[in-house]
């Protein structure tokens, strides 16, 4: 169990990350009929990365963002809009994807599948990525889809890794694709990337098992959902993780990197000292600048 000091630090970091007002997108487009099946688009607002690399400004790399929140309904894309805007101000075009999540936590009067929905959460992420090329052409003409990087935080980090691994899903998976997604890479931020380790560590109150429909369905559905079981992908992947994260401890990221190595794939693992869970998406934190640089290394 984390000590009182660690809990207090995590709370302070969360408060700081959530203190930024939501940033309205430049455009929003639907990829389905459900209210949660939407993508917000942010046009690039700066050219710092181009200048730092001696490049001329032009069509901007596209960063697809998937928010976290343990796949639970109270946590939607609004809390990550300051991070999306931060990336846009660094010269990226940004697509912030919403998706269906579970019900409210019991303390909020919720019942049923608390973390995520099976199969709807996965249906939505797959549908969003399938629809993105056309949506980007219409809503974000300043983007260069040929230089797409996917990023996500926490549960969204899981979904980012999963979206990049659809071509290695079991043959009977409805979300499987015939070929790898045309991505420059994935930058997963404190991802729930190894479900067995996450459950052993009781990450987010057993959210991984809840996402898969409970303990009775966990083993059956694991091969369809767990990034650690969907390797190698052949897509460049970096995990950025705080060493003092008590929400998704660094052991989860390390287990995923180990699984990748055993599958013959190298996954970059950037461990940040004295950084917890939330600074990775806090525009005011130094860790957020590190994240932007990791994305840039893949995109440019």
Image: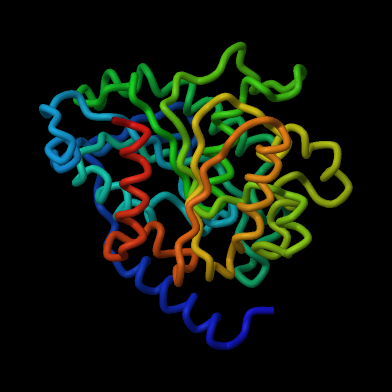
Between residues 272 and 80, which one lies in front from this camera angle? 272
Between residues 52 and 285, which one lies in front from this camera angle? 52
Residue 98, given in percent of the width and then of the height, sits at 45, 41
What residue sits 61% from the left and 63% below the top? Answer: 249
Residue 103, given in percent of the width and then of the height, sits at 62, 54
Q: Residue furthest top?
A: 178
What residue sits 73% from the left and 64% below the top? Answer: 201
Residue 299 relative to residue 151: left or right? left
Residue 112 relative to residue 43: left or right? right
Residue 182, given in percent of the width and then of the height, sits at 45, 19
Q: Residue furthest right?
A: 216
Residue 111, given in percent of the width and then of the height, sits at 70, 59
Between residues 44 and 291, which one lies in front from this camera angle? 291
**Compared with residue 64, is residue 113 higher up or lower down, i.e. above or below?**
below
Quadrant containing the C terminus is top left
Q: Quadrant of residue 265?
A: top right
Color encoding of the figure = rainbow
How many numbered callouts? 0
What residue sits 64% from the left and 67% below the top? Answer: 109
Residue 90 relative to residue 280: left or right? left
Quadrant containing the N terminus is bottom right
Q: Residue furthest bottom?
A: 4
What residue sits 47% from the left and 45% below the top? Answer: 152
Residue 136 relative to residue 263: left or right? left
């Amino acid at each position: 169990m984390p000590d009182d000091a660690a809990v207090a630090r995590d709370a302070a970091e969360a408060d700081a990350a959530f203190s930024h007002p939501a940033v309205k997108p430049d455009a929003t487009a639907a990829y389905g009929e459900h209210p949660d099946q939407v993508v917000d688009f942010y046009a690039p607002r700066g050219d710092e990365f181009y200048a730092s690399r001696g490049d001329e400004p032009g069509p901007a790399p596209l960063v697809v963002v998937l928010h976290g929140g343990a796949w639970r309904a109270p946590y939607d894309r609004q809390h990550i809009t300051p991070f999306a805007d931060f990336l846009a101000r660094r010269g990226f075009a940004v697509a912030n994807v919403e998706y269906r999540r579970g019900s409210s936590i019991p303390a909020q009067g919720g019942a049923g599948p608390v973390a995520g929905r099976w199969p709807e959460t996965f249906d939505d992420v797959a549908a969003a990525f399938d629809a993105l090329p056309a949506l980007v052409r219409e809503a974000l003409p300043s983007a260069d889809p040929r230089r797409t990087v996917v990023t996500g935080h926490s549960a969204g980090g899981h979904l980012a890794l999963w979206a990049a691994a659809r071509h290695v899903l079991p043959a009977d998976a409805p979300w499987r694709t015939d070929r790898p997604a045309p991505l420059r890479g994935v930058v997963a931020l404190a991802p729930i990337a190894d479900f067995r380790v996450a459950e052993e560590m009781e990450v987010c109150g057993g959210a991984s098992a809840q996402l898969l429909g409970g303990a009775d369905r966990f083993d059956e559905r694991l091969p369809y959902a767990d990034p650690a079981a969907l390797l190698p992908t052949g897509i460049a992947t970096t995990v950025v993780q705080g060493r003092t994260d008590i929400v998704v401890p660094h052991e989860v990221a390390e287990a995923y990197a180990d699984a990748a190595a055993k599958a013959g794939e190298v996954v970059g693992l950037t461990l940040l000292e004295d950084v917890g869970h939330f600074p990775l998406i806090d525009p005011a934190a130094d860790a957020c600048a590190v994240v932007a640089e990791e994305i840039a290394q893949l995109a440019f």
